[in-house]
Amino acid sequence: MKPYCGRILWVNLTTGTFATEELPESFYRMYLSGLGLAASLLYQHIPAGTDPLGPDNILAFVSGLLTGSGSLFTGRWMAAAKSPLTGTWGDANCGGTLSPAIKQCGYDGIFVSGASDHPVYLYVDNHGPQLRGAADLWGKDTIETEELLKKSGGGREPSVACIGPAGERLSLIAGISNDGGRMAARSGLGAVMGSKKLKAVVLAGSRPMGSESPQEMMRLSLPCAHIATHGIPLPSGRVMPLLGALLRHLPATVRMDGRLSVPIFRKWGTCGMDQASVEWGDTPVRNWSGSERDYHRQLSDAIDPDRVLAREQRKYHCYSCPLGCGGVCEWQGRETHRPEYETIGAFSALLMCNDLDTIYAVNDQLNRAGMDTISAGGTIAWAMEAWEKGVITPADTDGLALHWGDPAVVRRLVELMIAREGIGALLADGSLRAARHFGHDSESFAIQAGGQEIAMHDPRLDPGYALHASVEPTPGRHTTGCQVYYDMYHLWTRVPGLPTPLPVSTKAGKYRADATQAAIGVANSCFTQLFNGVGLCMFGAMMGVDHIPVFEWLNAATGWHMTPEEYMETGRRIQTIRQLFNVREGIDASSLAISSRAAGHPPLEHGANRGRSVPLVALMHDYWGRMGWDPGTGTPTAQTLQQLGIQPDTAVGDVPASV
Amino acid sequence: MAYCINEKCIGCSLCARICPVAAIEGHLHSIYVIDAAVCIECGACGRVCPASAIQDATGSTCSHLKRASWPRPEVDFAFCVSCIACIQACPVSCLGLGPPDSRDPHARPVLTLPDRCIGCGLCADSCPVGAITMK
């Protein structure tokens, strides 16, 4: 059987009707599934200038092409729509169980248009879709909602994606929750769901999934499973900051092998990296103005990975993941997901806070509210600096003093943001909008790209983060590429012509803008869109394509005989369609560049990243040119569109009528 | 292709009651019908039918089997990677995670509700590393 269903579900919330659209095999060869499916159809069906919170916006829930095929690490699902936070193409990526559940209902994607005038949820099982009233769920948090909805089916326990109070209140940094607080957090797509009065998507199908060649899939998966479950035994977490400090002091940079991250993720999960990352300059400190000298070892001891792990009860695995980097913990008598690297970074070093209880508390609160922890932490960091500079005064905060690192203040601000009360009403829409409200040049220290707070990875350490957060059609993203990811993906072992990084190179070489950096950036983007098309987890991809056989899985699962170059070209096609979406919206691509401070303009005067500046403008222009887009504007050229088989027609197609 | 019910059907309704996706409809003492668009080919109807009235997707007649003899999944923990593909594939949610042991925090799947298991084998089919056998 094919690994894709060959059809999608359209849901019109205004009329309460459904339609099924069949897609030919040629479509999947062109766009795979996942974000490729979403990009193609949303570009076709969302009219230019659509209000992201209006009924014309379309919210897609898509599964990966390889999900359920017998491959590993391929359980990621994605949501996509026009982002209300950035006004650009928007998408968000999540693990959990929704990706297989979409396919088990018989669809590769669910596309929701229109808006209901009352709260509803979408229920789908083997018999088809239904819209059900959700008045009794409106106002409940994501975990309560999911627990109630899991009892709603007649047969198997369903998978649920839902919003919490943040999405209902149209917070522009609201996400969509799945499987007890795994979050498709970015791009503000929870607000899109809230604007449609769609509380949840409940998927209870049980259709089999598979591939064209199950035996070959297993033959390919077994060595990959072995790598993911075996690694060197690790010592105590105390070693991690020492490792970070060592990397900081090394005069050269070493090519990273992603297999080394396997034992770290398997033992501690992503939180294994937090304290080390502060030390080597990856985690931003004090709203991107400080360094490890400010958030020194005595402070960062609070986020020693062993301390974070102490509350863990068991490991958490997303669907088809052999690694299990998540953790289920006990917090105040209830189960909660262990805070991830990003959440810990955003609520520790970024805010100068060293209270682990506060990190656990806000992680649970934000997951339950359905709010992006990266944007929430970044926005609070902006507010604390604004307080320090007198931009925000006690009159704005009802007397709350927004001092750096004060755990009580951090907790209170999170409560206010979730409730949209007091200053929280402004902060709930992110730092850029708050800065524009308060003025006084406070926009200069709202650290974001296109309005979305950038994640806890410092572009002054790895300029690839600056490039990708700036050229991504959904700006501000950290999972779309950087130089270290390229090291780990090992693409040059499968794709002829790509540069092979040296095992050891000078640190200064990272800060050049040249043809090699452009080639690396484009390869990262193409591969990212490829793995977002197939539902592959980035942590799996980090094992390197010579160890995680994504190209070989694709051919075995589909029966195709495509080359790695052809699959990479598919990634370029998806990236180009996403960029076309922004072009049609009239967005100036250069306006999506990350804030100057995060790019080292001016450079830091102390710490791991002192004196470092990223030649961002040159990197962006080189990237655009290499991608086949106009190097001056970032607009895909007619020649590129022709090469990729994309119709440069900006006319919007009709959403299929109900059947 | 889905399963189908032929004219040998005695209308006992056992197939409709065991079907995990409610794909079978009919009235007592009349021939029941499988909705091919809903059927997941789990085979439970064929195993429960006392009249050998059910044919699988290849046209072969299914054999009645006492429930105590239905195959059950056995998970080889030496191969299992805790990826939960089996739990997700199960149409009756009879598999769940067992408690992690003190040496390994990665919990493994176990048959938490054995009475609910219909012996379909979808869990074994879904396992990427072949850690499940139906016995």
Image (cartoon, rainbow, N blue to C red):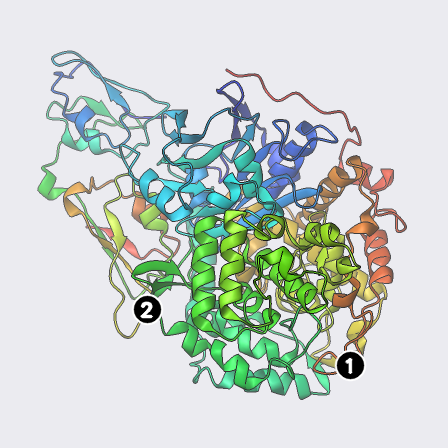
Position of A119 with respect to B69 (left or right) is right
For the residue marked with disc 2, what is the amino acid?
Pro
Chain label for disc 2:
B
Q: Position of residue B14 (x, y in %)?
A: 14, 25
Nearer to me, A321 or B133: A321
Q: Which residue is mark 2?
A: B105
Q: Measuring 58% from the left and 64% from the top, which residue is drawn there?
A: A546
Q: Which residue is mark 1?
A: A605
Q: Measuring 53% from the left and 64% from the top, which residue is drawn there?
A: A410
Secondary structure under tag 2 reads: loop
Nearer to me, A132 or A267: A132
Mark 1, other Cα within 10 Å: few <14 / some 14–19 / many ≥20: few
Which quarter of the rendered picture does the N terminus of chain A lie within? top left
Nearer to me, A43 or A6: A43
Q: Which mark is residue A16?
A: none
Q: Measuring 13% from the left and 16% from the top, which residue is drawn there?
A: B11
Q: Position of residue A60 (x, y in %)?
A: 56, 36
Q: Measuring 80% from the left and 69% from the top, which residue is drawn there?
A: A614
Are callouts 2 and 1 both on one chain? no
